[in-house]
Amino acid sequence: MDLPEFLLRHRAVIEPYLGDSAGGPLYGPPTPVDCYAEDKRRLVRDASGAEVIAETTLWCPLSTECPPGSRVIVNGRTTTAITTSRLEFSDATPNHMEVALR
């Protein structure tokens, strides 16, 4: 079971992080994603294990491509994905991708 449509009331534009080049980070094409965005500070660990503050959390469909380092525009601001969590459960609960943003 996926997230119900009534929860997906926000829209984010995600440019997936592809890696680094001599000129800086490389991003994929911007992709609009319907999601639920919560602006609330919380402590998360980044890919290196360091504790950082996430300012916003997105709940997106499982098919969302947003690796750490991706550029995300949501609620009028441009930010960066710190970490992503793929949350797949049984059919009794909604499956989704959780993205913590700087």
Image: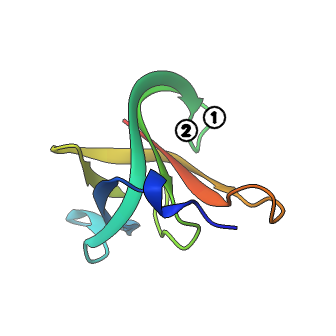
Residue at point 61% right, 59% down?
Answer: 96
What secondary structure is marked by label 2?
A: loop
Give residue 8's position: percent from left, percent from top: 42, 56
Q: Residues within 10 Å of mark 1 (few under 14, many from 20)?
A: few
Q: Which residue is mark 1?
A: 49
Position of 97 relative to 65 (above/below): above
Kind of residue indicated by mark 1: Gly
Left or right, 68 with respect to 72, comes to right
What is the number of the mark on residue 32? Answer: none
Residue at point 45% right, 56% down?
Answer: 6
What secondary structure is marked by label 1?
A: loop
Residue in front for this viewpoint, 2 or 99: 2
Kind of residue indicated by mark 2: Asp
Number of numbered labels in the structure image: 2
- Quarter of the picture holding the C terminus: top left
Q: Are marks 1 and 2 in contact (CB under 8 Å)?
A: yes
In this view, the residue farthest toward the left is 76
Give residue 60's position: percent from left, percent from top: 49, 58
In this view, the residue farthest toward the bottom is 29
Q: Which residue is mark 2?
A: 46
Residue in front for this viewpoint, 43 or 62: 62
Q: Residues within 10 Å of mark 2 (few under 14, many from 20)?
A: some
Query: Dividing the picture into quarters, in which one does residue 62 lie?
Result: bottom right
Residue at point 29% right, 69% down?
Answer: 32
Query: Dividing the picture into quarters, in which one does residue 14 lie?
Result: bottom left
Tell me if residue 21 can be seen.
no
Position of 38 relative to 95 (above/below): above
Tell me if residue 74 can be seen.
yes
Give residue 52's position: percent from left, percent from top: 49, 26
Cα gap from disc 1 to disc 2, whole angstroms: 5 Å
